[in-house]
Image: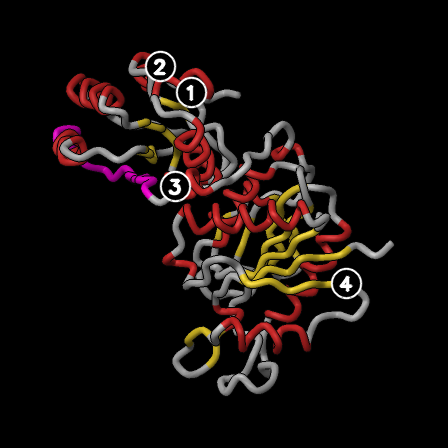
């Protein structure tokens, strides 16, 4: 029996036309997209609830996409391809991965060049859009259940995806082996109250710079005057940060104000390593330690925790689950 694919268009360079580029309205783009779809697959096209430049996407946009996917699952779709802009494609992939686990076959893709020419009348002479889409469609029916990013003939596990080049065709890196990173992740049913809560999700990431501890303390004081829901501290190397007693006390105060403080590393690959004595303060201060596969995955995990738990102490209790 042929597997039916739900192809969802969410915007991005893929659907842009003109010089300079601007998005073609979805109702005009979808019919043109249907003309280039492969005949050996059964594909139904849908427009995402929110279509915008991906650099402007926020958590609630991806939750509305999840809600759409979950409604389509009730209509017996189990294979999905999402066309999305590349700026936040890794974030969209990570969020879908965290919220869907292995409950469906989901592949996200995009392109560095538009599908259509500047006039929007025909396929562009040079584009990676068609190759990426065909690869994503084939992957959706062939890959095991889970969420993936398909780009430049690489099928990357969504939680590990990282954009590594701004303009090259080979723009993403991540794990292409195994599916263990999705194992055990339970799907979360999305509904309007969760979407509304996600609209207010305030997550700040602070990449450490080589400055004096007293200056870092002053910067953190400014943040503490109106704290976000989540403060991610990107340390050096394996997550090391030079701290003082004042900084530790301030981070503890942030937690008491309802701000979840998470330590991670600004190094793309390798993760946190707590063998060093300099990191003992992290345990003493009850700061959360990232165990995520990528920075986008850490964002997605923080978002899911924010939606599931109201108190930071609950985050501490469930962080390792």
The residues bearing labels 1 and 4 have C-alpha atoms spaced at a distance of 50 Å
Specify whether residue 23 is in view: yes
Q: CA distance from mark 2 to mark 4?
A: 53 Å
Near mark 1 (Cα within 10 A), the count class, few <14, some 14-19 or many ≥20, is some
Q: Nearer the viewer, mark 3 or mark 1?
A: 3
> Upstream in the sequence, badge 2 or badge 4?
4
Query: What residue do we see at 56% from left, 51% from top?
Result: 68
**Could you classify mark 2 by the number of other residues whose Cα lies within 10 Å: few (under 14), some (14-19), or many (20 or more)?**
few
Spot occupied by residue 249 in the image (x, y as percentages of width and height): 19, 18
Q: Is residue 263 above or below residue 131?
A: above
Q: Secondary structure at mark 4?
A: strand
Any mark on residue 274, and which?
1
From what the image shows, is residue 142 above or below residue 276? below
Alpha carbon of mark 1 to alpha carbon of mark 2: how far? 10 Å
Q: Secondary structure at mark 2?
A: helix
Dot 3 corresponds to which residue? 198
């Amino acid at each position: 029996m042929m597997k039916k694919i739900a192809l969802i268009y969410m915007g991005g360079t893929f659907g842009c036309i003109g010089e300079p580029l601007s998005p073609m309205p979805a109702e005009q783009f979808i019919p043109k997209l249907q003309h280039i779809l492969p005949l050996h697959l059964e594909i139904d096209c849908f427009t995402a609830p929110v279509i915008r430049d991906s650099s402007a996407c926020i958590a609630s946009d991806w939750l509305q996409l999840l809600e759409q996917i979950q409604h389509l699952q009730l209509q017996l779709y189990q294979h999905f391809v999402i066309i999305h802009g590349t700026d936040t494609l890794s974030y969209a992939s990570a969020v879908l991965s965290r919220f869907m686990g292995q409950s469906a076959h989901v592949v996200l893709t995009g392109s560095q060049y538009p599908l259509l020419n500047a006039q929007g009348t025909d396929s562009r002479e040079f584009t990676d859009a068609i190759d990426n889409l065909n690869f994503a469609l084939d992957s959706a029916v062939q890959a095991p259940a889970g969420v993936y990013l398909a780009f430049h003939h690489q099928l990357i596990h969504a939680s590990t995806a990282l954009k590594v080049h701004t303009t090259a065709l080979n723009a993403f890196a991540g794990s292409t082996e195994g599916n263990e990173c999705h194992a055990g992740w339970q799907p979360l049913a999305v509904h309007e109250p969760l979407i509304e809560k996600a609209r207010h999700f305030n997550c700040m990431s602070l990449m450490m710079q080589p400055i004096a501890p007293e200056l870092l303390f002053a910067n953190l004081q400014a943040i503490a005057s109106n704290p976000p829901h989540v403060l991610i501290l990107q340390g050096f190397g394996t997550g090391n940060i030079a701290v003082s007693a004042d900084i530790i006390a301030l981070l503890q105060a942030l937690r008491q104000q309802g701000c979840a403080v998470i330590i991670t590393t600004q190094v793309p690959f390798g993760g946190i390593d707590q063998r060093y004595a300099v990191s003992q303060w992290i345990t003493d201060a009850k700061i959360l330690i990232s165990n995520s596969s990528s920075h986008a995955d850490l964002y997605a995990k923080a978002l899911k925790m924010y939606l599931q738990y109201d108190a930071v102490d609950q985050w501490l209790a469930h962080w390792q689950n």
